Image (cartoon, rainbow, N blue to C red):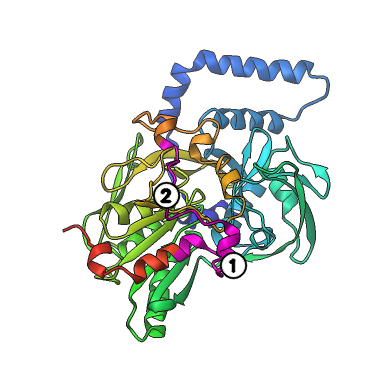
């Protein structure tokens, strides 16, 4: 794959810029870090001369690069060959596999979230699960890229996952049939009482335009008389910053949507309303934004913007807390650095890093029978090794969930199932919109 092809698509990932490295900057680094580079070269020479088996240069150089980036944060990395190809498939949203967003954690593969409607989602894999074996073979300790490569395969082929779910006494096995993952970034449905429900599953190409099209179709289905709107960002791992800005701009008419601040020239940017779409397409209509621990990055930008401008009520659970921007820096034609270059901030100046977006109304997913057990082991940005620290120095207790018993949320999953409620968070959002006047929910700040 030619890097130029990927470069044209780079703004569609969390990277928002292609920043060339300058020779002047490299010269300054070489001058100040000469002794340290000397140590690195000495280690290289010793390994080449004395290691028990011959080692190729590319293995050592790639290992050194990986080590440097691993010392930074969990979102920076070196991409070449198959890694760049995987990035391209992520941008396109088309590949054969299971449909999972995963991270490596101390040698284990941990699920951030299954993509909605994917084979993994339909098989019951959940956020927070650990995948320990593939077809009975232990994958603990493998590089994450290798584990992901093994999970992918031709559509229609089956793979057996051994899953450890925190809160359960024993691991369990689940057979998943790989599918062609053609992610639908936006899906929608007209709910009872003419309330629109738009699910944004990822932020890839044209999400803003897709949501606008969904809105128009919902209006047509409701004969133009929508009474409320749910923007569902749950288990959305993020993607394009530009598309997060576009989606927010659909519902805002003035003010800042998000800002990013970095050290390099051009990395401190403010994104304003009315630059992508004109007007508020749902003016006067009450909006609820649903988030959970799997809502990350671009999802948090949208939730934060609509919350700060009081254009929507945010419901659900505290989000993942990824408040950093990654840029793609080319290294020749077939390699690149995915480097964290900035932090982003909501319109009120709140950094999402670590703390995430706190809902206006915390609504637990009571329809999940494993809720109580899994909540003890949910993973967020603050749990990742080497994560960036929030400048405010948030303490762990400041980010803990409210443990007080809320009388509204006492029903069990079994009791909800008897009532036909499969998704309690969505049910609660719809009930809230059904009994709420537009002025009390969608009171946009003047």
Quote the CA–CA distance across marks 2 and 1. Answer: 21 Å
Q: Quadrant of residue 6?
A: bottom right
Q: Which residue is pictured at 51% across the width and 33% down the height?
A: 73
- Point out the residue furthest to the bottom here: 223
Q: How many numbered marks have been drawn onto this rendered protein structure?
A: 2
Q: Which residue is mark 1?
A: 418
SS state under label 1: helix
Does residue 405 appear anywhere in the picture? yes
SS state under label 2: loop
Per the image, is 324 magenta?
no
Q: Which residue is mark 2?
A: 406
Category of crowding for the residue at label 1, using alpha-carbon neighbours closer than 10 angstroms: few (below 14), some (14–19), many (at least 20): few
User: Along the horizontal axis of the image, is 430 left or right of 445?
Assistant: right
Per the image, is 402 magenta?
yes
Q: Which residues are magenta?
A: 399-427
Q: Earlier in the sequence, mark 2 or mark 1?
A: 2
User: Along the horizontal axis of the image, is 97 left or right of 317?
Assistant: right
């Amino acid at each position: 794959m030619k890097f130029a092809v990927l470069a044209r698509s780079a703004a569609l990932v969390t990277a928002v810029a292609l920043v060339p490295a300058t020779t002047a900057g490299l010269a300054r680094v070489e001058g100040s870090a000469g002794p340290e580079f000397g140590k690195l070269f000495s280690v290289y020479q010793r390994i080449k001369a004395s290691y028990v088996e011959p080692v190729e240069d590319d293995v050592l150089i790639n290992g050194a690069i990986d080590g440097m980036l691993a010392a930074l944060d969990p979102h920076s990395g070196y991409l070449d060959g198959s890694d760049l190809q995987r990035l391209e498939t992520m941008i396109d949203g088309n590949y054969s596999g299971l449909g999972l967003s995963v991270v490596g954690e101390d040698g284990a593969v941990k699920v951030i979230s299954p993509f909605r409607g994917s084979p993994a989602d339909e098989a019951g894999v959940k956020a927070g699960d650990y995948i320990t074996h593939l077809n009975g073979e232990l994958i603990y300790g493998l590089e994450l890229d290798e584990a992901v490569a093994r999970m992918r395969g031709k559509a229609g082929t089956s793979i057996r996952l051994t899953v450890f779910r925190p809160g359960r006494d024993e691991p369990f096995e689940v057979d998943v049939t790989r599918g062609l993952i053609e992610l639908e970034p936006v899906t929608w449905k007209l709910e009872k009482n003419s309330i629109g429900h738009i699910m944004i599953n990822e932020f890839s190409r044209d999400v803003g335009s897709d949501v606008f099209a969904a809105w128009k179709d919902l209006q047509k289905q409701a004969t133009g008389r929508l009474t409320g709107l749910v923007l569902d960002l749950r288990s959305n791992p993020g993607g394009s910053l530009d598309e997060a800005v576009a989606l927010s701009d659909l519902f805002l008419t003035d003010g800042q949507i998000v800002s990013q601040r970095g050290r390099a020239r051009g990395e401190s940017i403010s994104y304003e309303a009315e630059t992508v779409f004109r007007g508020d397409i749902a003016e006067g209509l009450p909006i609820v934004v649903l988030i959970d621990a799997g809502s990350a990055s671009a999802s948090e930008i949208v939730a934060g913007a609509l919350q700060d401008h009081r254009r929507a009520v945010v419901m659900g659970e505290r989000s993942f807390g990824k408040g950093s921007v990654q840029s793609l820096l080319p290294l020749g034609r077939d390699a690149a650095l995915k480097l964290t270059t900035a932090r982003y901030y909501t319109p009120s100046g709140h950094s999402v890093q670590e703390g995430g977006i706190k809902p206006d109304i915390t609504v637990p997913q009571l329809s999940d029978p494993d809720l109580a057990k899994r909540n003890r082991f949910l993973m967020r940005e603050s749990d990742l090794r080497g994560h960036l620290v929030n400048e405010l120095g948030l303490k762990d207790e400041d980010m803990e969930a409210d443990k007080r018993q809320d009388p509204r949320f006492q029903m069990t999953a079994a009791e909800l199932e008897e009532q036909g409620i499969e998704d309690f968070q969505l049910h609660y959002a719809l009930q809230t919109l059904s009994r709420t006047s537009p002025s009390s929910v969608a009171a946009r700040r003047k």
